[in-house]
Image: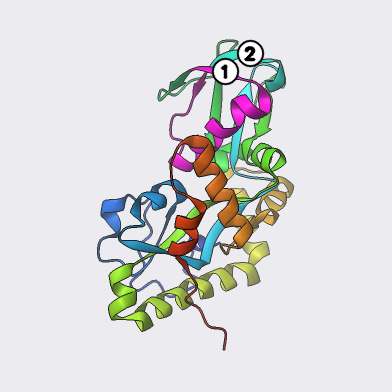
Amino acid sequence: MFAYPCAAGWVEMSGVELVDRVAPGQVVGASLAIMDSVVALTMLATHVIVRDIAVVVSRASFLTLSSHTRPDEIERIAVSVAGVSPVGRAIATAVLEPFYGISVSEWSEQSATVSRDRAVIDEGAAALVPAEDEEQYQEDLGRAWFLMTDKPVPTHLCLAPRSLLANDPAAASAAVARLLQARATGESRGRELRRDLSNAHNLDRETLVETLAEQSYTLTDDAIDGLAELSRRTGLRVTRNAIRSAAVALHRAE
């Protein structure tokens, strides 16, 4: 909802760089960066979390587990996480055994196909593509997280340098306003956005609509609670108090 309006040329792009899976070293000098929430939690010494901008999932997500049989019938199996983001891996780690009862024998970085010995996690548009083999099972891991915890979870956070807020808070607020405008444009042209994405990735339009409907785009208290719970369950050791103290709202409605 933030990136596509920029990529499609619907909003002014000057000063905006679209980077796939932003790494910590790539945000040096940036006013704002929207990035993987697990990676973002490693940067709180130098950055604040901007509450006005986030990507939060609840009852549907772009993260699925594909397996040869029902997940709750699997006791132990290897899992391929090739190409899966840090937050996607964290959610998978948090739900596979506690929610499904699956003991993971190996987390593999190699691309693989589903078999009796291996399950596969897909993320992004690939997660919404139905399996060609109708005997396979696909489970939404973001939905599993929500059912297990009754909490949404942010997949992406927006960070701003602490030094920028101290030295030029107006610049940070202006950057937030630009991203909020991109989101508003995406929402106002939502039908066009969904059509373009479904065509580009060969997705079922109804499935895409339902998945996007379960995303929200600000960091609420409930979302902070979900992120803190994910941190606790996966050993990230970033507490709820640490997340809350780093989270600030920069946008002021006119």
Numbered circle sitting on residue 162: none
Q: Residues within 10 Å of mark 2 (few under 14, many from 20)?
A: few
- 11 lies left or right of 33: right
Asked whether residue 213 is drawn in magenta, I would say no
* Residue 195 in the image: above or below residue 86: below
Residue at 28% of width from left, 79% of height from top? 167
Give the x, y percent position of residue 210.
72, 50
Tell me which corner region of the image, top left, top right, bottom left or bottom right, holds residue 183.
Answer: bottom right
Residue at 47% of width from left, 76% of height from top? 250
Question: 81 or 106: which is nearer to us?
Answer: 106
Q: Is residue 216 visible?
A: no
- 183 lies left or right of 134: left
Question: 23 or 11: which is nearer to us?
Answer: 23
Q: Please give the range of residues in magenta.
A: 78-105
**Amino acid at circle 1:** Ser
Render colour scheme:
rainbow
* Residue 140 in the image: above or below residue 71: below
Q: Are marks 2 and 1 in contact (CB under 8 Å)?
A: yes
Question: 226 or 84: which is nearer to us?
Answer: 226
For label 1, the residue is 103
Q: Residues within 10 Å of mark 1 (few under 14, many from 20)?
A: some
Quarter of the figure that contains the C terminus: bottom right
Residue at 70% of width from left, 53% of height from top? 209
Question: 240 or 252: which is nearer to us?
Answer: 240
Asked whether residue 89 is drawn in magenta, I would say yes
Give the x, y percent position of residue 133.
67, 21
Quarter of the figure that contains the N terminus: bottom right
For label 2, the residue is 75
Residue at 45% of width from left, 74% of height from top? 176
**Amino acid at circle 2:** Glu
